[in-house]
Image (tube, rainbow, N blue to C red):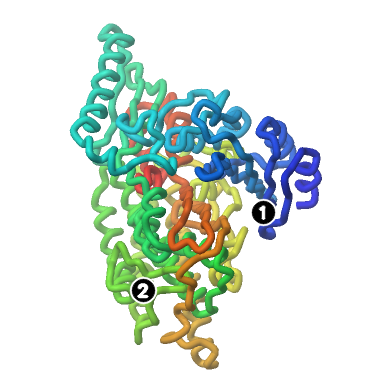
């Protein structure tokens, strides 16, 4: 970190501080220094942009842009800030996308929702939001949601008009001569979910893919500003239903940091168990979904059968199977029920009994081997360039995992290592999921053993140690929290005002944004039949993509 300090101190800074062991926090005095600073950081190995987070300080008439930049190899990260004018005509700053391609869609999102114009961006455009929000920038503090929602019919018509205009443009440019056309894969394709891929083809060969996202955009970050700090759990857990526990851990950590509170050892290990239950339930859907995109739907039913047992464990704790609301600032929501570990062990036993059959029948499936091996390869350099995360990154052999790189909850007291593959192809992106389920089960066993030992020594009380008292109003502050979500790094940037009862700003970054952004690179030159297979291998969730 000392070398990064030296680099940053070459520029005119308002401040530079050590934020966390793996993070430096710095604020530039001049926005003109942004590109020189980013170039200098890249030279030192900080090559990836996790996300870009504007904060609208309307009372101070400024927009603060936060860049979260990471060195995925040495685990040195920089939280870089800079102020720009808030007025739309002056609300502009240089794009870092030409230097860090991983920033591409994050800048587009900031432009579409806050009106920050990134000069020099290779293709600045409205993104994520639908046509009725164009030019309105809905995350600005002065956007009138109630007024916008009065014009439902007009808004729907604008969305429809955009589709017709696009159709006419394609008709005019491409026509019907030759073998070139634009195919719309989704948003109703059985393998796509609510996303549309505009696939430009020449016969069967894919020439370009332009993802169209936002079909399930719910403005979760804005919704968080309308709720108190406990009620915000309802928003963050709906980032994606397949793993709803880990987003709650991520958000709760940020609130606890600003409040200056530390949860109990019991709650830390409970967060491990609940987090790994969520990860396993999600991974089982990803396993089945991969084969589902190949047309082999039997395996999805097989995986859902096993997943039911893990959902049973979540239900036995929280009363709900999907939207569990089981984690909140201060710890975990409920005392541990008597005999709850029996439910967890029953789920573990179900997977372990099925493990050999899954491996023999499906992971060694000759059709999967033929179609997936060597197909859709990513390299370790691609991980840095596009900030691929989680299982997608680890399938290349890249050693990144927030649970190890920046331990949280009870992970720092557990024994485990990076799970990985080497080839970075579609097959390894399936195999890594299977390996990670086995790792999650081991982590649950270790966490349960720690709790049982703590109870035996009377150091933990499962009926009282689940939750500490949190303040009803928060002090002014901001925090960055990261967890290893089922699909990779999840980062939340929380800003609070003095004596606030609700978040002032909550930025949610999840990995499907970058994993969708690289579909064009992944699919160019492939055939149309490769789309479902390679798309399925990316384990994309539209919930965290659109939020």
Residue that appears at 72% across and 54% down:
17
User: Residue 325: percent from the left, percent from the top?
Assistant: 35, 66
Tell me if mark 1 has few (under 14), some (14-19) or many (20+) residues whose alpha carbon lies within 10 angstroms of its own: many
- Residue furthest left as drawn: 153
SS at badge 2: helix
Mark 1 → mark 2, Cα distance in angstroms: 40 Å
Tell me if mark 2 has few (under 14), some (14-19) or many (20+) residues whose alpha carbon lies within 10 angstroms of its own: some
Point out which mark residue 216 bears.
none
In this view, the residue in front, 68 or 529, is 68
Point out which mark residue 23 bears.
1
Q: Does label 1 or label 2 sit earlier along the sequence?
A: 1
Which circle, 1 or 2, is nearer the viewer? 1
Is mark 1 in CB contact (under 8 Å) with mark 2? no
Residue assigned mark 2? 349
User: Residue 230: percent from the left, percent from the top?
Assistant: 40, 66
SS at badge 1: strand
User: Residue 270: percent from the left, percent from the top?
Assistant: 46, 75
* Left or right of residue 421, residue 347 in this image: left
């Amino acid at each position: 970190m000392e070398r990064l300090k030296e680099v940053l101190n070459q520029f005119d800074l308002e401040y530079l501080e050590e934020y966390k062991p793996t993070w430096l926090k710095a604020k530039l005095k001049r926005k003109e220094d942004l590109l020189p600073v980013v170039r200098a950081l890249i030279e030192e190995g900080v090559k990836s942009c996790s996300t870009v987070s504007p904060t609208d300080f309307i009372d101070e008439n400024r927009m603060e842009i936060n860049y979260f930049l990471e060195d995925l190899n040495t685990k040195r990260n920089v939280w870089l800030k800079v102020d720009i004018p808030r007025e739309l005509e002056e609300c502009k700053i240089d794009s870092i996308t030409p230097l860090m391609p991983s920033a591409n869609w994050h800048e587009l999102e900031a432009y579409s929702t806050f009106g920050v114009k990134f000069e020099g961006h290779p293709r600045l455009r409205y993104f994520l939001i639908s046509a009725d929000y164009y030019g309105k920038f809905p995350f600005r503090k002065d956007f009138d949601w109630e007024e916008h929602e009065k014009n439902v019919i007009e808004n729907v018509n604008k969305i429809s008009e955009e589709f017709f205009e696009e159709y006419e443009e394609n008709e005019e440019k491409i026509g019907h001569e030759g073998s070139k056309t634009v195919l719309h894969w989704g948003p109703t394709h059985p393998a796509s979910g609510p996303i549309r891929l505009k696939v430009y083809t020449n016969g069967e060969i894919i020439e370009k893919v332009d993802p169209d996202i936002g079909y399930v955009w719910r403005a979760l970050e804005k919704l968080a500003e309308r709720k108190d700090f406990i009620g915000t759990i309802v928003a963050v857990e709906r980032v994606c239903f397949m793993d709803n526990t880990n987003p709650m851990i991520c958000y709760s950590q940020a609130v606890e940091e600003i409040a200056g509170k530390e949860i109990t050892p019991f709650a830390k290990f409970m967060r491990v168990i609940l987090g790994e239950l969520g990860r396993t339930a999600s991974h089982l859907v990803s396993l089945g979904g991969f084969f589902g995109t190949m047309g082999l739907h039997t395996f999805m039913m097989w995986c859902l059968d096993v997943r039911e047992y893990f959902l049973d464990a979540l239900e036995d704790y929280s009363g709900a199977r999907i939207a569990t609301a089981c984690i909140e600032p201060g710890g975990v929501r409920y005392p541990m029920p008597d005999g709850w570990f029996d439910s967890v062990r029953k789920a573990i036993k179900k997977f372990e009994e099925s493990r050999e059959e899954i491996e023999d029948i499906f992971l060694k499936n000759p059709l999967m081997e033929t179609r997936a091996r060597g197909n859709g390869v990513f390299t370790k350099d691609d991980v840095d360039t596009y900030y691929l995360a989680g299982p997608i990154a680890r399938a290349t052999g890249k050693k990144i995992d927030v649970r190890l790189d920046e331990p949280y909850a009870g992970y720092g007291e557990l024994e485990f290592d990076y799970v990985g593959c080497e080839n970075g192809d579609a097959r390894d992106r399936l195999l890594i999921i299977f390996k990670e389920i086995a790792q999650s089960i081991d982590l649950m066993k270790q966490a349960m053993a720690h709790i049982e030992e703590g109870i035996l020594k009377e150091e933990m009380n499962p009926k009282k140690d689940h939750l500490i008292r949190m303040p009803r109003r928060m002090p002014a502050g901001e925090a960055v929290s990261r967890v290893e979500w089922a699909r990779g790094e999840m980062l939340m940037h929380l800003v609070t005002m003095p004596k606030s009862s609700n978040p002032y700003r909550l930025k949610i970054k999840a990995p499907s944004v970058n994993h969708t952004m690289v579909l064009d690179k992944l699919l160019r030159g492939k055939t149309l039949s490769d789309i479902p297979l390679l798309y399925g291998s990316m384990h994309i969730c539209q919930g965290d993509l659109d939020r």
